[in-house]
Amino acid sequence: MKRCIILIAVLLFTLSACSNQRREIHEPVNYYYLSTNPQLQSGGSMISCEIRDKFGHTNDYTYLLEDYLLGPKSAESVSPFPAGTGLIHFDLVKDTALVNLTSHLALLKGHKLTMACACLGRTVLEITGMKSVQISAQGELLDGKEYISITSSNLALIDSYVSSQ
């Protein structure tokens, strides 16, 4: 009888502990990459969105950016970054996210750099809720600039280009 009472007490304690545990809420995060099939003639975009779960890393921006830089998991997307591009430093200052990547980013020029920064910028703006993001490459210039600044107001992800063919 004594064992039965102890067993019941242990079960009640375990059940009450389980009910008090916070359940982890899974929240989606949007990662933006280049589309492998943009279909520009039909109004498609060169940028695609891959939805992933934050898995308890809601405010761990460094983790989320490192995860983002690993590249897409979907066949419909491709990373705009050169192989080996990684996160050196991330910080939030006032309403701006500062993202410093490895020097690999500086290998991109012209429209390829623009598209990579648009993908990264949109991802960072959504993840952090900041008003702007400054993207730099460790010790390198990006098309002659120390950094590229992107705000939600100057970032358009809808392509308005229409082929003349």
Image (cartoon, rainbow, N blue to C red):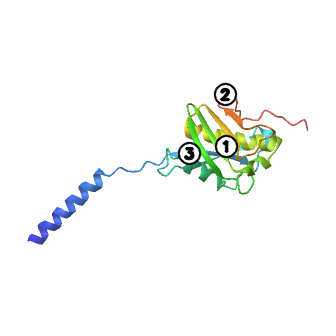
Tag 2's secondary structure? loop
* Relative height, residue 28 to residue 94 (above, below): below
Binning the other alpha carbons within 10 Å of mark 2 as few (below 14), some (14 to 19) or many (20 upward) gives few
Q: How far apart in space, not on screen, are marks 2 and 1 (Cα)? A: 15 Å
Residue that label 2 marks: 153
Q: Nearer the viewer, mark 3 or mark 1?
A: 1
Binning the other alpha carbons within 10 Å of mark 3 as few (below 14), some (14 to 19) or many (20 upward) gives some
Q: Which quarter of the rendering shows the N terminus? A: bottom left
Residue that label 3 marks: 29
Does residue 84 appear in this view? yes
The residue that appears at 43% across and 48% down in the rendered structure is 25
Does residue 80 appear in this view? no
Residue that label 1 marks: 120
What is the three-letter code of the residue carrying label 2? Ser
* Relative height, residue 55 to residue 44 (above, below): below
120 to the left or right of 8:
right
What is the three-letter code of the residue carrying label 3? Val
The residue that appears at 66% across and 37% down in the rendered structure is 134
Which of the two labelled residues, at mark 3 and mark 1, occupies the earlier sequence position?
3
Tag 3's secondary structure? strand
